[in-house]
Image: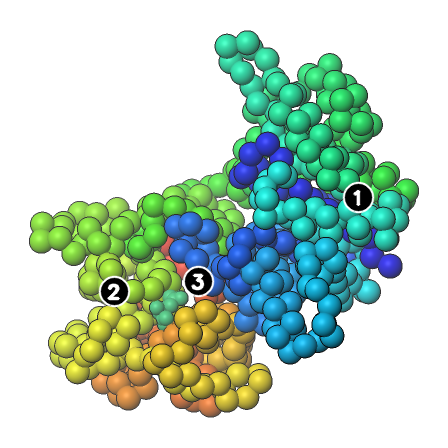
């Protein structure tokens, strides 16, 4: 039976619990164990699909079409284990399911309550489909003491009793702040947080203490004494020089050893050669390139988390540092915008996914610059749609636009009302709900033989990539676009939906309707990103 590791956070939010969970999972995996990580979010949204990227960062899409928390991206990038719909739950989803059952009469007249009904639902979610695993890491969003998090902590308490202490391990991530006036690290917030957790019935087994300065032995002993854990189980977690160092650093501090000791589990030392290589590539580049990302949510890098990572992975593949310049597309819409001056220093231009009309003309202007100047261009989802609108305009269809931006006489991009998925024909109208109604998850594409993308994918003729969009490039414009030099080199298997466009007369110009960044990993950079950065390296030698 799988063993369960419950990860909670205390003192403040943003302690990097997701990265911690991903790193511990990677360390256990490197010792030969089968792992899976699940995220429990206490907020009332059913999923993050309808939340603003400014508030919540990127929405991470899984193969099976779930719109999930961005921490699932960390999990997948660090373990290579594909996340699923049943790896992310929110209070909203728990309540929605319970209330639907209550309305159907499934509770046979019983009073429906937080305990046991909500807690049972949370427990069932944690336990589902875990038979083939050695360790299930359950990360709980929020901070201990939050009102909305209480049913989740209660579910942990019950599970620890039901499964047995030897089957479960509670890790609490806290902050040990440095007070410069006193010149000291302070343990009191950690003590308070553990007291709060213990008062809810969960005594932590391991404390991971985030700190900006090394944790002196005396402070470690003090935390152990007051928090009722072994001194060796108080793991200092100093700020790391990069996220890729975190697994190595936690291993050096004894995190995985302590967790295995708790479970009484012998295991071989982890094989961390892969992580050594990643860290080496990241910290010792042999050159650098600058990529301009022309988007909308540029004020918050978390909004493009996977994209940021995939570009770095592309750099690792080429042993170069990737400097990313986040450029607000709207500044290219001003009359005095000197687009050339801003984009000339870029060795590659990327227009990422996005929603809404704001900044769209600025994105189209960036596509034009990249096309005319022969600068490597990568368009992702909305970026591909803008490449097609720009292609149509340059081919003489001046009114070309997307119906997402309002009514247009030349809908080069339009809403899709039906498409084939693994479950059969999907249909949608203009007034359908916004949540969960996009083309979501993994879909296959057929690549044209001898195309640039087919070569990038190592000669593949069929690929599978993840989607999240409501609009599609309108196939009716294919002849006009192809005549203008924009070739449709990837199509849905039924030949109806354009998946990839490219320009054979350009050094590197690719637009994809899907999100390749979601599948890139530091130990397995996505071929499109590796190739795009290689083209940027080439470009950097020309200018
Ligand atoms: N807004 C566009 C659509 O819905 C593109 C979405 C995206 O870039 N993810 O089709």
Residue 174 visible in the snapshot: yes
| Residue 103 at x, y percent in the picture | 62, 75
Q: Residue at x 45, y 75 (%)?
A: 437
| Relative depth, front residue between 110 and 443 | 110
On the picture, is 351 further left or further right than 85? left
Whether residue 540 is visible:
no
Distance in Å between CA atoms under marks 2 and 1: 48 Å
CA gap between label 1 and label 3 equals: 34 Å
- Provide the secondary structure element on which disc 1 rests: strand
Residue at figure coordinates x 26%, y 46% from the top left:
345
Q: Is residue 168 above or below residue 382?
A: above
**Looking at this view, is 20 or 199 the one in front?**
199
Q: Is residue 313 left or right of residue 340?
A: right
Please tell me whether mark 3 or mark 2 is closer to you in this view.
3
Quadrant assignment, res 367:
bottom left
Q: Closer to the N terminus: mark 3 or mark 2? A: 3
Dot label at residue 50: 3
Q: Earlier in the sequence, mark 1 or mark 3?
A: 3
* Direction left: furthest residue: 335
Q: Residue at x 60, y 29 (%)?
A: 175
Query: Which quadrant of the figure has residue 487?
Result: bottom left
User: SS of the residue at dot 2?
Assistant: loop
Image quarter where ligand 1 lies: bottom left
Residue where numbered disc 1 is placed: 169
Against 524, residue 226 (above or below) is: above
The residue that appears at 18% across and 54% down in the rendered structure is: 332
Distance Cα–Cα, label 3 vs label 2: 17 Å
- Residue 126 appears left or right of 471: right
Q: x, y (%) of residue 199?
A: 73, 35
Q: Residues within 10 Å of mark 1 (few under 14, many from 20)?
A: many
């Amino acid at each position: 039976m799988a063993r369960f590791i419950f990860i909670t956070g205390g003192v403040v939010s943003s302690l990097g619990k997701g990265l911690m969970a991903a790193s511990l999972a990677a360390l256990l995996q490197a010792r030969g164990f089968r792992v899976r990580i699940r995220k429990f979010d206490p907020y009332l949204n059913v999923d993050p699909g309808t939340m603003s990227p400014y508030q919540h960062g990127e929405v991470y899409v899984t193969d099976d079409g779930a719109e999930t928390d961005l921490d699932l991206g960390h999990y997948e990038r660090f373990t290579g284990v594909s996340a699923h719909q049943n790896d992310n739950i929110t209070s909203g989803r728990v309540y929605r399911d319970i209330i639907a059952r209550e309305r159907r009469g499934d509770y046979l007249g019983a009073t429906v309550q937080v305990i046991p009904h909500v807690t049972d639902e949370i427990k069932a979610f944690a336990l589902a489909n875990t038979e083939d695993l050695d360790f299930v890491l359950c990360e709980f969003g929020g901070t201990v003491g939050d009102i909305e998090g209480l049913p989740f902590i209660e579910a942990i308490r019950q599970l620890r009793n039901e499964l047995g202490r030897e089957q479960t391990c509670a890790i609490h991530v806290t902050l040990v702040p440095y007070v410069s006036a006193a010149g000291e690290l302070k343990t009191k917030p950690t003590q308070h947080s553990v007291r709060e957790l213990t008062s809810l019935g969960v005594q932590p087994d391991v404390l991971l203490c985030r700190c900006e300065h090394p944790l002196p032995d005396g402070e470690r002993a003090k935390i152990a004494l007051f928090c009722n854990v072994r001194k060796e189980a108080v793991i200092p977690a100093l700020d790391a020089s990069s996220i890729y160092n975190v697994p190595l650093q936690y291993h050096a501090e004894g995190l995985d050893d302590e967790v295995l000791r708790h479970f009484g589990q012998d295991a071989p030392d982890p094989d961390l050669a892969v992580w050594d290589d990643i860290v080496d590539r990241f910290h010792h580049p042999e050159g650098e390139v600058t990529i301009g990302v022309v988007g909308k949510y540029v004020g918050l890098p978390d909004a493009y988390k996977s994209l940021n990572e995939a570009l770095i992975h592309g750099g690792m593949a080429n042993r170069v540092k990737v400097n990313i310049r986040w450029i607000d597309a709207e500044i290219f819409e001003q009359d005095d915008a000197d687009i050339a001056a801003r984009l000339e220093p870029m060795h590659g231009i990327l227009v990422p996914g996005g929603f809404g009309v704001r900044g769209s003309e600025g994105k189209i202007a960036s596509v034009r610059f990249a096309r005319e100047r022969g600068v490597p261009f990568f368009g992702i989802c909305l970026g591909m749609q803008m490449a097609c609108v720009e292609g149509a305009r340059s081919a003489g269809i001046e009114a070309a636009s997307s119906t997402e931006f309002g009514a247009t006489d030349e809908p080069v991009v339009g809403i899709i009302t039906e498409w084939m998925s693994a479950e059969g024909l999907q249909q949608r109208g203009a007034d359908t709900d916004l949540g969960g109604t996009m083309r979501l998850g993994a879909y296959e594409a057929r690549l044209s033989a001898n195309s640039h993308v087919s070569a990038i994918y190592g000669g593949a003729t069929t690929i599978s990539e993840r989607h999240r969009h409501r609009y599609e490039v309108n196939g009716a414009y294919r002849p006009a676009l192809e005549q203008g030099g924009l070739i449709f080199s990837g199509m849905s298997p039924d030949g109806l939906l354009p998946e990839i466009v490219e320009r054979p007369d350009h050094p590197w110009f690719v637009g994809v309707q899907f999100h390749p960044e979601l599948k890139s990993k530091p130990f397995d950079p996505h071929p499109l990103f590796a190739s795009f950065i290689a083209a940027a390296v080439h470009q950097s030698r020309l200018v």
